[in-house]
Image: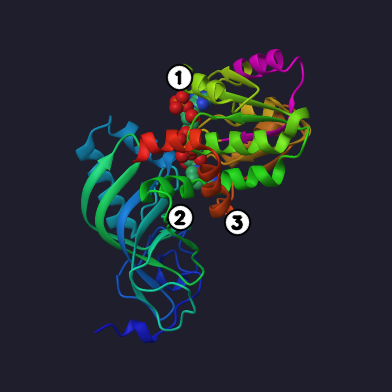
Amino acid sequence: MNFLKNIKGCPFGSHRVIEPSGALPQSAKKIDNTMEIYSNEILINVQTLNVDSASFTQIKESCNNDIKCIENTILSIVEERGKLQNPVTGSGGMLIGTIEEIGSDLNTDLKIGDKIATLVSLSLTPLKIEKILNINLETDQVDIIGKAILFESGIYAKLPDDIPEKLALAVLDVAGAPAQVNKLVKEGMTVAIIGGGGKSGLLCAYQAMKNVGKNGKVIVIEYSKENAERIKKLGLAHDVIIADATKPIEVYQKFIEVNKGNLCDVTINNVNVPATEMASILITKDDGIIYFFSMATSFTRAALGAEGVGKDVTMIIGNGYTKGHAELSLNILRESPEIRKIFEEKYC
Ligand SMILES: NC(=O)c1ccc[n+]([C@@H]2O[C@H](COP(=O)([O-])OP(=O)(O)OC[C@H]3O[C@@H](n4cnc5c(N)ncnc54)[C@H](OP(=O)(O)O)[C@@H]3O)[C@@H](O)[C@H]2O)c1
């Protein structure tokens, strides 16, 4: 008998925080992952976790790509914290699953059996894993038997009929990035996209090309030759630079060479490794904007680094949410058969 289902919890989930008291679930060290819902929560039968790329990369590296070690790491994080929040990167990911129970105090369009993707981070989502069924090293996706809780304030998207589930999950995980590009990038601007060959990078490059129009310019900075070639072939940038974004001077020199001595108006950072803040700062002009979508971004490195080189730039923390982000990002797949094909090859 679940007595909790007659009690209304905090809309933001603070009632499940165990430690430290007074915190909200994202910053909490440990949350209560009892899978009995309060009257304003939703219980989800989880199918797949899409682990955040910075987190998955860190776990993979610390495990030398060993599947058993990755499995144990994921299980022990969830056991310890009640949620899948990487203690090193602090980040989480997203999930897809089926609605199993809906609290009586919730006013929602969802019904039992609906398939959804949560649009709030796994770093704040109560999660219980019974078993890990499969870990895909290429896609950062983990199939599990398990359950999760969505708080009253938690946003979600019903999975669309026209896009395969795992593909939709991958796109929804990074939906905030192209939607923010749409807000920040205006006609005629020069835009740099660092890590433009990855999942969020491709979507951002597409959106940036659309927004800059015929008088603007999109320059992608990408690590691997292969991804750089793909961007060029797809016409997702006016120029592509192959460089290591952890080497700021190398990136800066290549950038001004390609851009005829000029810096850019907006930089979008989509990289999944640490220490790329200074490359972003050096290539952005004074009064320009940098959107740090990367979860490997350090506030200290960015703030003190910009000050250290006398750069008056506006630096935006990559809020994963902006209004309409799910539709905008899924629509890119509907508009661009080329991008859809790349995602399908990886996720289907
Ligand atoms: N703010 C949010 O709410 C939010 C939500 C989801 C994800 N994220 C974060 O966003 C970032 C991107 O996620 P994603 O899923 O798009 O990742 P992804 O698909 O793994 O792409 C990462 C990209 O970074 C490139 N890269 C790696 N090291 C590089 C280097 N030293 N120099 C230049 N490029 C480098 C990779 O290039 P190669 O493939 O050529 O190595 C790849 O193109 C991650 O940090 C992720 O954690 C943030």
Residue matched to label 2: 121
Percent position (x, y) of residue 228? 52, 21
Q: Is mark 1 within 8 Å of ligand 1?
A: yes
- The residue positioned 45% from the left and 48% from the top of the image is 91
Magenta region, residue range: 250-269
Are dots 1 and 2 in contact, CB under 8 Å? no
Report the front residue among 168 and 293: 168
- The relative height of residue 41 versus residue 273 in the rendered view (above or below) is below
Are dots 2 and 3 in contact, CB under 8 Å? no
Residue matched to label 1: 226
Q: Is mark 2 within 8 Å of ligand 1?
A: yes
Report the front residue among 183 and 279: 183
Report the amino acid beneath label 3: Gly
Residue matched to label 3: 324
How far is the residue under mark 2 from the one under mark 3? Answer: 17 Å
From the image, which quarter does the N terminus lie in? bottom left
Report the side of 138 relative to 295 (left or right). left
Tell me if residue 260 is in the magenta stretch: yes
- The relative height of residue 327 versus residue 112 in the rendered view (above or below) is above
- Looking at the image, can residue 297 be seen? no
Kindly indicate the quadrant of the structure image that contains residue 282. Answer: top right
Q: How is the image coloured?
A: rainbow
Tell me if residue 238 is in the magenta stretch: no
